[in-house]
Image (spheres, helix red, strand yellow):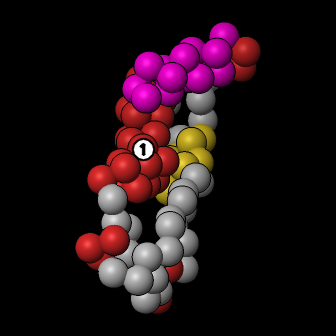
Amino acid sequence: TEAICKQIVQKTIESFGQVNIVVNNAAVQFPQKNLEDITEEQLKRTFETNIYPLFFLTKACLPHMKQGDSVINTASVTAYAGHDQLLD
């Protein structure tokens, strides 16, 4: 959640005084043979792991970062090559 990301950043600032780099490197996917088999819960979990934290953590860090600092977002090879059962 956004609140958890804010807490993480606040603890980081308290411990280290600054944020110079953010690495967003968490993801999950669940194999399904058909798009119709993806439940709302599965899609929600995928977005809650893959999308929301990336956005909220970066958003919380930006006020503490200066020019020249970095945000790195990683992606699986699946993003480029695709997979016939990773549809979410």
Name the residue tied to disc 1.
48
Instruction: Identify the secondary structure beneath mark 1.
Output: helix
Q: Which residues are magenta?
A: 1-14
* Residue 18: percent from left, percent from top: 61, 22
Location of residue 23 in the rendering, given as x and y in whole percent from the top left corner: 59, 48
The answer to whether residue 51 of the structure is visible from this angle is no
**Viewer-closest of 4 and 11:** 4
Q: Quadrant of the N terminus?
A: top left
Residue 3 lies left or right of residue 37; in this view the side is right
Residue 38 % position (x, y): 34, 66
User: In the rendered image, which quarter is residue 55 located in?
Assistant: top left
Question: Is residue 39 in view from this perspective?
Answer: yes
Up-down relation of residue 15 to residue 19 (above or below): above
The residue at 66%/11% (across/down) is 14
Instruction: Give the side of residue 20 with respect to residue 40, left or right.
Output: right
Q: Is residue 42 magenta?
A: no
Q: Amino acid at mark 1?
A: Glu
Q: Residues within 10 Å of mark 1 (few under 14, many from 20)?
A: some
Write the residue at 50% across / 27% down.
5
Main SS, magenta region, reads helix
**The C terminus is located in which quarter?**
bottom left
